[in-house]
């Protein structure tokens, strides 16, 4: 079985390596944070993409989008508000079209 090796000092062996335990902990934490996004961040990103796609496919009909996602209408409204998902009208010259872009405020 292959094992993932991270170039950091194990906090348990930090004193043998001549490094303080807190420095070893910081190195391990930094390596873990830089290597992979958190599970929460991945879940949020996936949730935003799924909701955005469903809203685009239904022309922003939220009831249909909720059915597509198999969640309640109120649950979808909560997620739209929570992630600040908005529809942005594209403007071409002086007239507005009915085309929407999905975006969110940061």
Image: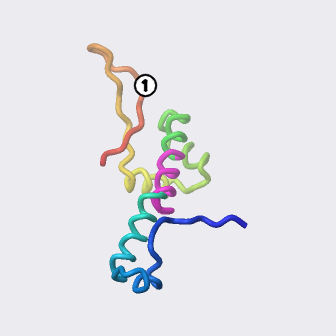
Q: Look at 37% across and 53% down and name the residue there.
A: 81
Kindly give the residue lying farthest to the left in the view shown: 94
Q: Of helix, strand and loop, which mostly describes the magenta segment?
A: helix
Kindly give the residue lying farthest to the top in the view shown: 93
Q: Is residue 81 left or right of residue 44?
A: left
- The quarter in which the N terminus is drawn is bottom right
Nearest the viewer among 105 and 31 is: 31
Image: 32 above or below 59: below
Circle 1 residues within 10 Å: few <14, some 14–19, many ≥20: few
Kindly give the residue lying farthest to the right in the view shown: 1
Q: Position of residue 83 (x, y in %)?
A: 39, 52
Q: Position of residue 106 (x, y in %)?
A: 30, 48
The verdict on residue 40 being magenta is yes
Q: Look at 43% across and 71% down and name the residue there.
A: 28
Image: 17 above or below 101: below
Q: Which residue is mark 1?
A: 99
Q: Position of residue 41 (x, y in %)?
A: 45, 58
Q: Magenta segment range?
A: 37-50
Nearest the viewer among 95 and 38 is: 38
The verdict on residue 17 being magenta is no
Nearest the viewer among 24 and 99 is: 24
Q: Position of residue 89 (x, y in %)?
A: 35, 28
Q: Look at 47% across and 37% down and name the residue there.
A: 60
Q: Is residue 97 left or right of residue 7?
A: left
Element carrying mark 1: strand
């Amino acid at each position: 079985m292959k094992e993932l090796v991270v170039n950091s000092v194990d906090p348990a062996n930090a004193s043998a390596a001549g490094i303080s335990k807190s420095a070893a902990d910081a190195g391990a934490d930094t390596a873990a944070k830089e290597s992979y996004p958190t599970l929460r961040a991945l879940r949020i990103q996936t949730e935003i993409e799924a909701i955005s796609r469903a809203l685009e496919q239904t022309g922003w009909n939220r009831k249909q989008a909720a059915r597509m996602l198999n969640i309640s209408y109120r649950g979808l409204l909560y997620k739209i508000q929570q992630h600040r998902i908005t529809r942005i009208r594209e403007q071409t010259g002086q007239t507005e079209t009915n085309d929407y872009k999905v975006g969110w405020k940061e």
